[in-house]
Image (cartoon, grey):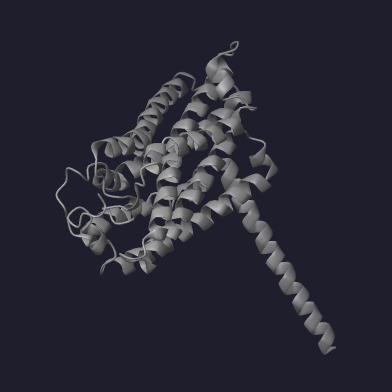
Amino acid sequence: MEGSNATFEYVYDFYGSSASWFAIYIFATSTFIVISNIFFTIMTLSTPKLRVNVANWFLVGLSISDQLHYLSHVVDAYAIYTGSINNRYWCSIAGAFVLITGTCSFGFPAIIAADRYYKICTISQPSGFSLSSALFSKRATIPLIVSWFFIAAISNLPLMLNDAFGEDPSGFCGAKKFTSIPLLLGYEFSVVFAYFGSLVVTGVFYYRLAKWLKLHQTASTGNRQEVDYTRSIMRVMKIVTLMPAFLDGPVMTLTAMQMLLPEMPMWINRALVVPYFLSSTANPWLTIALVKQFRVSFLQLLLNAKKSVIRNVDTVNRSTIVRQL
């Protein structure tokens, strides 16, 4: 029960001396991630060459899920900085959205890897109707993205119905200290399952893609662009998958095993959680750097911006010269 001082003694430490610096860190990194992903989404949707490629919509889905997740962490930072043992409301709100959006973000690398595999295999071995071809068809792209958002939210229903969101013993607003095995299992089969399940599925399809590309190194000219795009996406997904596997590990361990691990000072938990906020900072910029379509569009955007600045400066100079004359 929440009234037990022994069970919820950690809440006093949660709003203690380490709260201020950790909240500032969360706010700074999360704001940067949100702005980066908003830029990536706008650039993709406003560039015809990027928008018409259906595969890029899954990257947009990943970007939007990261926007929502780290926007939740902005509220998380506010809740930690301004909260107290008598002001816990915003932490429960932030915790709910942190877990729901985090579950959603974890699944997109697996969806992207599966989409690439089934799309690239269709090039060399076109076949009739199959579940995979229907699931990753052009018309199913948006419904698949929306469906995954819905599944991610529904998977957290047991936690929603049991008031399980709030001060996570790991140091951020997420899942409150579990008081029963069923609640812990609810977390294990939602957030943890999505996290490790995505890693496994992404790894399986990455291996299958690598094997397929090795057997089809001499792709025809017409398919070369699709193959090159797939290789680039594979590089991005490899990094996007491996980085969280190392950087997010402490967060998943501290929360998923909180009933088994010995209690540690909050500042140590928060120090272990710090790398979690670094893994998503690179996602949009990795895609821009490693995928040619995005790199070309980004460089073109920079070139247009430079020309616009030069024109504006030239206009100001001309106006100044005319006034002087």
Q: How far across and how far down the image is residue 164, in percent?
A: 34, 46
Instruction: Say which quadrant the C terminus sits in.
Output: bottom right
Q: Residue at x 40, y 31 (%)?
A: 202
69 or 307, which lies in front?
A: 69
Q: Quadrant of residue 173?
A: bottom left
- Regarding residue 297, the answer to whether it shows in the image is no
Q: Residue furthest left?
A: 262
243 or 299, which lies in front?
A: 243
Q: Residue at x 29, y 48 (%)?
A: 251
- Regarding residue 308, the answer to whether it shows in the image is yes
Q: Is residue 298 above or below residue 227?
A: below
Q: How far across and how far down the image is residue 105, in percent?
A: 45, 42
Q: Tell me: 35 left or right of 204.
A: right
Badge count: 0
235 or 20, which lies in front?
A: 20
Q: Residue furthest top?
A: 128
Q: Residue furthest bottom?
A: 324
Q: Is residue 284 above or below residue 145?
A: below
Q: Is residue 104 above or below residue 11?
A: above
Q: Residue at x 38, y 49 (%)?
A: 279
Q: How far across and how far down the image is residue 172, in percent?
A: 33, 56
Q: Quadrant of residue 152?
A: top left
6 or 28, which lies in front?
A: 6
Q: How far across and how far down the image is residue 207, in percent?
A: 38, 25
